[in-house]
Image: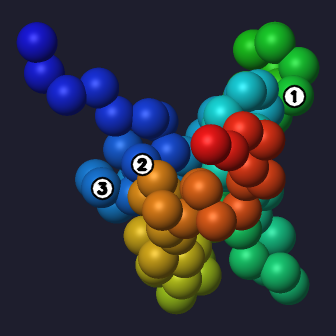
Amino acid sequence: MGTVWPQSTLFAQVRTVPVVREVGGLADTVTQYAARNGGTGFLFKEYTADAMLEAVQQAVALFARKREWSQLRRMGMAKDFSWASSLESTPIFFSR
């Protein structure tokens, strides 16, 4: 059996821009892109085709603006999804 990668790590590894439903770990790791404050991808909340289509349309519109698209890709690749980073930002509830 192959290695199972968390979705957000996979996006960074293959240099894709995620278009994902805002649930679970994806909601924790993918941030909505906005021109003024960056982000790492495109999110939609509702479990509907219309909501997903809107997010895809936002991604396609940005893809036409190559400079911004490249910046978004670089921001996603720069994110640190390592366990070390996760542990630093997570409170420790148990200790020996």
Disc 3 is placed on an element classified as helix
Query: Does residue 3 appear left or right of residue 24 in this picture?
Result: left
From the viewer's perspective, is the residue at label 1 or at label 3 nearer? Answer: 3
Mark before the other along the chain sequence, 1 or 2: 2
Q: Name the residue under label 2.
A: 9
**Tag 3–tag 2 contact (CB < 8 Å):** yes
Q: Which quadrant is home to the N terminus?
A: top left
Residue 45, percent from left and from top: 87, 28
Q: Which image quadrant for residue 75? A: bottom right
Residue found at the far front of this picture: 96
User: Which three-letter amino acid code belongs to the residue tagged 2?
Assistant: Thr
Residue under numbered circle 1: 45
Find residue 46 and report its horizontal and vertical position in percent.
88, 20
Q: What residue is at 19 percent from the left and 28 percent from the top? A: 3
Q: Image quarter for residue 85?
A: bottom right
Which three-letter amino acid code belongs to the residue tagged 3? Gln
The relative height of residue 6 versus residue 51 in the rendered view (above or below) is below
Distance, label 1 to label 3, CA atoms, is 25 Å
Q: Residue at x 60, y 56 (%)?
A: 87
Visible in this render: residue 2?
Answer: yes
Q: In this view, does 3 lie above or below 9?
A: above
Q: Disc 3 designates what residue?
A: 13
Residue at x 50% of width, y 45% of height: 8
Whole-percent x, y for residue 5 in the image: 34, 34
Secondary structure state at the residue bearing disc 2? helix
Q: Is residue 31 above or below residue 50?
A: below
> In percent of the image, x 44 and y 35: which residue is there?
6
The residue under label 1 is which amino acid type? Answer: Lys
Q: In this view, does 95 lie to the left or right of 64?
A: right
